[in-house]
Image (tube, grey):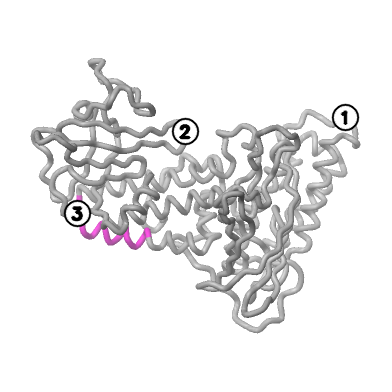
Amino acid sequence: MRSVVVAVATAATALWVAKASAASLLDCNSVDTAYRTVCNEQELRKLGSEIDDELARLLRSADPLTALLLKRDQVYFTDILGADNIPGFQSHNDKGYARILAALKARRRGLTELRAGGVTTLEGDWSNVFANVTIAKAEAGSLTIAIKSRLSYPNENRGEVDCAAMVTAAPGKDGSYSAAVGKDHEGRLDIIRFRLQGNTLRIVHEVNGEAGVCDGKPHDSDRDRRGGADVLTGSYFPIGPAAKAAGATARAVAPSFDCAKAENADEEEICADPEMAQADRNIARLFREALRRIDHTIAGYLRADQRSWASDNSTDFLFNLQPGSDKAQSSVHHTSAAREQLFLRQQQRILLIANLDEKRKGIEGVWHGYNASLTLAPAKGKSDGTLHAEGSKWDVEDYKAYCNFTSDGGSDPAPTTRSFTSIRPRRRRARRFRRNSSEAGTMTSRGDDGSPPGIAIEPRRIFGLEIPPSLLARADEVIE
């Protein structure tokens, strides 16, 4: 969305900074490096330097998108390594020393096997920091995909991944393939989808149940059997010599912005994924069309809402990638969950912008913004003009900052007469809609006079939507 939203807030960029060239893995030449304990070990320091050299070799010959994703892959490896701020090793037989040594050796070997250059076919061997993949021809135009993942995070209770899966994938549209890779006790299927994105292989793991395909598991036998790391979704890089198959080099689906200038984690993920890149283009087109239809004042409100939504994307993606809400798993990666949520946010945005109701008069109807949704309708069984309100409010930076509200009340005596109405509830106005004081999960703030809270969505506006009946079910699923 860089081409449409001129200035996106950068509150989340401190968490994820894209550099023009890859930084040194261990930064041993820095006086205040966080890796001093590891840098003091000659064997580990040498391996870190060799990894830097191998990555630099790949970056020199990689196209801009592949280079971007290789550097992101290295950031993920740094998380897995967990070698910063270690107090010390007891000896070279120390368990922590052995884990870091094994991880560095595996990373060096993995980078040595990678190659940069043109890709013309899905068939062959692929790898990233999380897993290795082999794709081969099967019958009737299908492909077999074999995935093997083995990695160890510092948090062994949640971060041990050791698995393998092999399935036959059927062809779909746009050069993609898909296959079911697991079924849970309720019959829900996990799905693997893959296709080329430029010179990389993009794999998406749709986790639809509790099949537990390649996720980290606790080592003990307690009752908590939640999976840990979920790492199959990602960008994979070719291994070994280029395929001899004839054909043109694969083209990447480009989003609305220049991926060579991507700065935030969500932008890198969109560049990596052809489906999400196309969704970004659709959002940009719909946004431009909406701005041409609405008046100058409302266009300003919509631009502000768009900037806030875009800014929240990076925060939300990182939150879901390594969810701090679960302290037992906050150090491990959840690439599938993070991708799923970001794509859901894109679908939500498309639904909002495509269904803006610029002809609305009055306040009844469905309203939505980047962090709130609201439905206003005549209250059932009442004929005195009472309205019934239901909605939600959320904050992506705090998983606890979410509430649902419902209430009956009246509207302002002189509602706005704009043909395209945007609502900006204020506390004065909000108290006109009282919530049921016995309802759980509602807002807890009170008015200045101590009255019960009402609908407090300030300081942002929400926009009227005209959603066709055929989309109502989808609206409930996507918006909420």
Q: Nearer the viewer, residue 437 or 236?
A: 437
Say few, some or many: other residues with alpha carbon within 10 Å of mark 3 (under 14 / 14 to 19 / 20 or more). many
Closer to the camera, 251 or 423?
Answer: 423
Q: Position of residue 40 (x, y in %)?
A: 83, 36
Residue type indicated by callout 1? Gln
Using the rendered image of the protein, determine whether residue 28 is visible from the camera's viewpoint. yes
Q: Residue 52: x, y in percent?
A: 74, 52
| SS for dot 2 | loop
Precedes in sequence: disc 3 or disc 2: 3
Q: Residue at x 39, y 46 (%)?
A: 309
Mark nearer the viewer, 1 or 3: 3
Question: How many labels were placed on the picture?
Answer: 3
Name the residue: 49% across, 46% down: 314
Which residue is at 82% across, 51% downward? 105
Is residue 265 placed above or below 198 in the rendered structure? above
Give above or below for 193 relative to 15. below
Q: Which residue is mark 2?
A: 398
The answer to whether 457 appears left or right of 57 in the picture is left
Quadrant containing the C terminus in the rendered view? top left
Task: Indicate which disc, 2 or 1, sits on the residue closer to the N terminus.
Answer: 1
Q: CA distance from mark 2 to mark 1?
A: 39 Å
| Residue designated by label 3 | 358
User: Taking 437 as reference, is 386 left or right?
Assistant: left
Start and end of the magenta stretch? 283-296
- Rounded to the nearest whole Å, what is the CA distance between mark 3 and mark 2? 32 Å
